[in-house]
Amino acid sequence: MVAAILLAACGVALASSGATPQVRPGQFPPPRDPRQAPPPTFRVQVELVQVDVIATDAQGRFVDDLQKADFEVLEDGKPQQVATFELVNIPIATVPDRATTLGLMPSDVRSNSGDTGRVYLFVLDDMHTRMDKSSYARVAAQKFIERYLQPGDLAAVVFTSARRNVAQEFTSDRRLLLASVNSFMGMTVDPGAGAPLRGQMAIVDTARDVSSTLTALAEFLGRVSGRRKACVYLGPGFQIAPHGGTPGALSPGEYRDLVAAANHANLAFYTIDPQGLSTLAEGATADTPSLDAVAAFDAADAAHEGLGGLAVDTGGFAVAGSNNLDRPFARIQRETSSYYLLGYYPPQQKEGSTHTIGVRVRRPGVRLRARSEYAVPKASASTMTNVKARNVPAALVPALDNPLPNPGIRFSVAASAFNGAGNAAPFALVVIEIDGRDLDLGGKGGVDIAEVAVDKLEKIHGHDVRHVDLALDAASLSRVKQQGLRIHARVPLDGDVKTLRVAVSDASTPRVGSLSLDLDAPDFRTAAASMSGVLLTSGRAVLLPTANVDEEFRKSLGGPASTAREFRPGDSLQWLVEIYEKPGAARDVRVTTTIAAADGRLVLTRDERRAMSEPRNGRGGVQVTGGMRLTDLAAGSYVLRIEALLAGEKQPIVRAVPFNVKD
């Protein structure tokens, strides 16, 4: 999350007993107990240290033509050999207006083959924010998500109180991110007239817990390499005691742990007090501020100093006392869009030790910004994921625990939720289409696949693990190599599932791919009426080899369910949904199916009435199918929209799937 989503320190775990296996992929970890004894010190294996470097000219413009030989990296003043070098330069599209941004429709298919955009972690500090000031953080986060988050970016939302039920795992769906942000509420109260310092102390007392949460999050993100990560902190800040001993404030050691974890994770903190100038106006009269107000100002300044230090020490920047956040938000976007990623292998060092990093450039006139240190991870950080998995292949476990896509094996996934038959749990029909070029097709290997369904609290409500043998004849192997491989699976959804995590490994090579996708799974058992997800297929879908094809849906749909959402003119498109109603009810339903072009023009409109009293399938639903030849459709973007309106209801149930027609 984060999204994936919730990020967790405990990772993935499958029960080894005969009971239903339980899996716990990454979720937001709880705050660590600062009193916990540190683990024994030992020397760790040398690992790649990555440093992201922002290079600008005298006008502040990014310099994008530097080469590996232009950089020099030093650790503790000693030159290091640059082992890896990458230029990351993600284009920034024109910012759409709010209405357009909110109207963007995310695809129901996720793929790990495209380039991941920017990676943001929004941390909303509810433990320090007063209830009556909650709107400042909400509005600021909303603005960033609506105006600066672009297609392909991944973001997650977490609260410092570690309330996982309202947090959001890593996703590209603005609607889910906004829903999480809109639930934000500060947890401190107005101290009341004559006693503001009691309120300030209550806020300061939470600093250690907040720091522990941030440190655990940074340690988790340390497992995600190859990308600059931006933590956008929104809150009033917390104090850091320069010499220790201040009640509630962070000690120098606790602060160093937080900075070390962030720098090891390549996580830059952008710390923002969204209250702006309102903080400075608190408690003051028009003439002279009261002594209580002065104390409040001093506490606020100390908290801002803490935020400023955290930002500088991790390669970000801080904003306080400003009501205009557009400029800093745009700067955050730029700094996470264009940078160089350098990697080197340091000498073997003592666990927990900290080392300075220096980066120089040999071209005159170029200015560099990069983090200035890194810490060798402690045992608690390097072994955060306590993985126990008997029936998930070992290669898939860390992939399932990673909230960001891994393109080691490229594939796409679509998942549609359906009601279960009889007393069986609902399930998701999961369609996975793997790029055959990433598989070992020597005729002796195979593919391992695992899908895990989790709720917002990261409790597992179903999973599926399978192996597909690739010991095929020459003709079949050639088809898989050229066209890929499709796999169908039914994953039980025995609960309020929000996320599906999928991992694929080649049993004959070290290659692994993974991704997470949001799953819209209604409560079929309690809703008065509900609709399944949409399955799509096409005339060309039969050309892709399919393992474990779901025969029931293949027969109803007219072909194997597919992840394809791009079609050629002249191809055919078929769709399937199921409509459910509570047992005992039998209202008629009006089903309206439309296909609209990007300009809103309807190219298909179909109305039909179905009697819910007619014989239903084993899942208690009425199945609705349809199809269309795409011969007359011009190249462009379209949306298939299916509405079901039951008699007596005012609002229809809606499913919509975007697709493209391309020459």
Image (cartoon, helix red, strand yellow):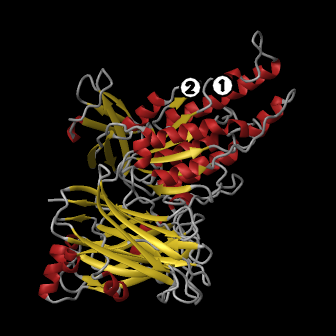
Does residue 370 lie above or below 650 as drawn? above
From the viewer's side, name the closer residue of 517 and 417: 417
Counting from the top left corner in percent of width and height, residue 512 is at 33, 69
Q: Tell me, yes or no, if residue 374 can be seen here.
A: no
The residue pinned by badge 1 equals 278
Left or right, 389 with reference to 436: right
Q: Earlier in the sequence, mark 1 or mark 2?
A: 1
Q: Amino acid at mark 2?
A: Asn
Q: Is residue 109 above or below residue 599?
A: below
**Helix or strand or loop: what does disc 1 sit on?**
helix
- The image shows residue 223 at horizontal and vertical percentages of 45, 58
Of all residues, the one furthest to the top in this rendering is 287
Residue at the image point whose x is 75% and y is 36% from the top: 245
Q: Dot 2: what SS?
A: loop
Q: CA distance from mark 1 to mark 2?
A: 9 Å
377 or 232: which is nearer to us? 232
| Residue 265 in sight in this render | yes
Q: Is residue 361 left or right of residue 197?
A: left
Between 415 and 79, which is closer to the camera in this rendering? 415
Residue 595 occupies quadrant: bottom left
Q: Which mark is residue 186?
A: none
Q: Amino acid at mark 1?
A: Ser
Q: Quadrant of residue 607?
A: bottom left
- Would you say the residues marked 1 and 2 are in contact, meaning their CB atoms lie under 8 Å apart? yes
Residue 425, image x, y percentages: 55, 83
Which residue lies at the image location 55% right of the left edge and 77% below the top edge?
587
Write down the residue under mark 2.
323
Q: Quadrant of the C terminus?
A: bottom left
Q: Front-most of 284 and 358?
A: 284
Badge 1: few (under 14), some or many (20 or more) residues near its Cα, within 10 Å?
Answer: few
- Would residue 244 appear left or right of 544 to someone viewing this image? right
**Mark 2 closeness class: few <14, some 14–19, many ≥20 residues within 10 Å:** some
